[in-house]
Amino acid sequence: MAHRTPQGSFALCESEASVKKRLTGTEITPRYDNKITKRGNGMDRQRLMKLTLVAMVAAICAVGAVIKIPAFIATAALDSAPAFLSVVFLSPVLAGVAGVIGHFITALTSGFPLGPLHIIIAVEMFIVVWIFGIMHNKGMHFWKWPVALILNGVVAPLPFYFIISPAFYWASLTSLPLATLINLIIVAVAMPILSKVFVRKAGRLH
């Protein structure tokens, strides 16, 4: 008596074979899975390092904010030096963020004498540090210093010529460029040493 294959069994076998064939090569191998895990851990570690360094720079800015520079503007302090210095190991954007935090801490320790206008100063601080960082990355090691001095010491207070008064602007020019110069001198002294430490070991974080 001949054996009969039940109707539909061949189609079932063919269907299972096609599924197996289709799935072949598409499953994630343990080695590939490990690479994904390691890459994810590396990104998390780098993100944590960025946040840690930005927080560290902001904390140093807080220390510098306590050291006031006798000037017409009450918020003149050594708070911008750490932000300028951070372009060695942070991207221009993150260095600018650190500068913004540093200014707000300085304004807080001074009692916010300009009120909401400190938001404008913080934005200007971000732009100045950002430009300084870009020039540093492009190797413009001479021009970055006068540009930072002019932008932070002369151009940054210019909006207050129209917002507050011309007298306020001209009075700020008697002290703000000097305060900026002191911060930049500190950066110029510390930057070569810091560059050797960070660039050689870890590089710059973006």
Image (spheres, rainbow, N blue to C red):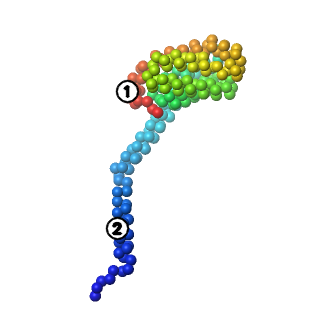
Residue 185, x across and y down, in percent? 50, 15
Callout 2 secondary element: helix
Q: Which amino acid does label 2 sit on?
A: Ala
Farthest-out residue, top: 174
User: Is residue 142 shown above or below 102?
Assistant: above
Q: How far apart are marks 2 and 1 (CA)?
A: 56 Å
Mark 2 / mark 1, whichever is N-terminal: 2
Residue appearing at x 70%, y 21% in the figure: 162
Q: Where is residue 137 in the image (x, y as percent from the top left)?
A: 45, 25
Q: Quadrant of residue 44?
A: top left
Residue linked to disc 2:
17
Residue 83 in view in this figure: no
- The amino acid type found where label 1 is placed reads Arg
Image: 205 above or below 39: above
Quarter containing the N terminus: bottom left
Residue at 51 percent of width and 31 percent of height: 94
Question: Label 2 neighbourhood size at 10 Å, few (<14), some (14-19), many (20+)?
Answer: few
Quadrant location of residue 68? top right
Q: Residue at x 55, y 17 (%)?
A: 149
163 relative position to 138: left or right: right
Residue 200: mark in rendering: 1
Q: Mark 2 against mark 1, which lies toward the viewer?
A: 2
Nearer to me, 76 or 146: 146
Q: Marks 1 and 2: in contact by CB < 8 Å?
A: no
Where residue 25 sits, quadrant-wise, is bottom left
Which residue is depicted at the point 70% across and 16% down? 166
Circle 1 — which element? helix
Give the image location of residue 195, x and y in percent: 42, 23
Residue 126 horizontal/vertical position (percent): 56, 27
197 sits left or right of 64 in the view = left
